[in-house]
Amino acid sequence: MRAQRQADVLFLSAADRRGRRAAALGALALVLLFLFAPFVFLGARSHGLVPALASLADPYLQGVIGFTLGQALLSTLLSLCFGVPFALALHRNRLPGRALLLRLLLLPQALPVLVGALGIVTIFGRNGAVADLLVWLGLPRPSIYGLPGILLAHVFFNMPLVTRMALGGLQSVPAESWKLAGQLSLSPLATFRLVEAPALRAVLPGAAALVFMLCFTSFTLVLVLGGGPAATTLQVAIYQALRYDFAPDRALALALAQVGLVTLFLLPTVLARPEAALGGFGLGAPQRRFDPPSPLRAGLDALVLAAGLVLLLAPFAAILWSGLQADLGKLLADPQVRRAALTSFGIAGGATLLGLALSLALVLSAGLSGTLRLVLRLVPALGLVVPPIVIGAGWFLVLRMTGDVARLAPLVAILANAMAILPYATRILAPEAEAAALRAGRLASSLGLSSWARLRHVELASLGRPLALSASLGLATAIGDLGSVALFGSQDFVTLPTLLLQRMGSYRSTDAEGLALLLGALCLGLILLAERGFLERRAR
């Protein structure tokens, strides 16, 4: 009866309910099969689940798990320590070009991880600008490889994310609260304690959980900057266990440990109820701060903003400068680059189409029952619980048994990237789909529109911009992906990120820098297009 009432609210006919429920169950079956079948195959090639789990008693594997947790915790703390002051400084100071600065915070998310790693090495590596400055000061050249490099790279990628989320919390405070703080002439410390801190407390737990998850499941950065066995995370250890040692027992144990730990940290954030509106009652007036002058705070804010901008922009400047030194025309004419680009676009296009189709099947069925709504919240998160390298490990073994890895590897890459698209595609599409059904469902029902006609004229007609936004994000994510294809790399299956990694490994640094510029510009353009669509959607 409850499902019937919820379906009636959306004005769905019995045929629509059956069709949408069938599509959702089919999407759910495909997602679960693709994500969890690898564990069956890994178990079949190992000596059993119990011996595999017993191998976790190995001191080396325990060290890998401990290092994975430790570096994720340190990376999260550093990202918060840099991101929160940067957000506070941005919110307190209405600087010229502030809108442009906020857009710059999007750059690390737009950049493929491998490209960002190359930029960080160019600036902070042994031959980078920072090393040259330290030598000029009479200090030894630093080594970026190992834990310091991993932490630096994670802060570079995640500090802007923390800043944007903290700014969102501060901007949710009613304008009346800032005006009252100014009228009372609250000191900077009192303003922080009474106004800023409560807003930050509402958003920082979610930000910390997200950053921890991203750092815990980091693969490419650790692969490039780890520097040896002492700085190995679970995902890199899985890759090494299959790619170099071919040890399915160890790979299965590490994969289960990865999934168990990620689930332990992720599940509370998925099931948590959304926070209540921040800051209490307000009349919707535009925000304006009335802080009394404080030279000390102004100086600290200027220092924080300068340091943050250097950390944010220096790797991008290095990528741009070094990339322009390469012969870009020769690179574009290189047949290997062209084949890699076609492979990347093929995988990205297929993954985006499949990811959007699965997201639509889940989203359009969410209103049928509370169970399906809960499934919509849980299933997309499985793409984070079972990362691409773990998925690829099981399917790598399957393809090895068929003896035709190269021919079927693109299909695995498409499916793995489609799973990675699910979490944010469903978040973007779900509110719009529900609003469209409530807005036009009664009219569609009174006109007797068939299932396909209703889908075309009601839901899809309202989802054009959100679908374009999701597609842009999906293409950028899949084009820059390395994790899902890391185990399958060969001369017959090369994408732009794997080609970039090969050129870096063969000391063809000029070509690698040129490829990094081209790949980074492509993904940046897609992400900025998506951001523009997101802002226009919010304005409507």
Image (tube, rainbow, N blue to C red):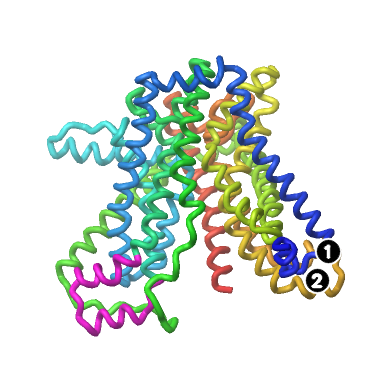
Q: Is residue 282 left or right of residue 24?
A: left
Picture disc at residue 453: 1
- Classify the position of the N terminus by image quarter: bottom right
Alpha-carbon distance for marks 1 and 2?
Answer: 9 Å
Name the residue rendered at 30%, 54% in the picture. 308
Regarding mark 1 in the picture, which secondary structure is present there? helix
Judge the density around disc 2: few (<14), some (14-19), many (≥20) Cα neighbours within 10 Å: many
Residue with the mark numbered 2: 444
265 versus 166 height, above or below: above
- Estimate the x, y position of residue 524 in percent, counting from the top left: 50, 51
Residue situated furthest left in the rendering: 138
Residue 121: give its label: none
Q: Secondary structure at mark 2?
A: helix
Q: Amino acid at mark 1?
A: Ala
Near-viewer residue (57 or 483): 57
Q: Is residue 388 at least partly visible in the picture?
A: yes
Q: Magenta segment, which residues?
A: 172-199
Q: Find residue 305 and report its horizontal and vertical position in percent.
A: 27, 60
Residue 468 lies, with reference to residue 178, above or below; the image says above
Q: Are marks 1 and 2 in contact (CB under 8 Å)?
A: yes
Q: In the visual, does 41 lie left or right of 258?
A: right
Sequence-earlier tag: 1 or 2:
2
- Residue 378 sits above or below residue 502 on the image: below
Kindly identify the residue that appears in the image at 82 percent across and 71 percent down.
445
Badge 1: how crowded within 10 Å, few (<14), some, or many (20+)?
A: few
Magenta span dominant secondary structure: helix
- On whether residue 176 falls in the magenta region, the answer is yes
Q: Residue at x 64, y 58 (%)?
A: 370
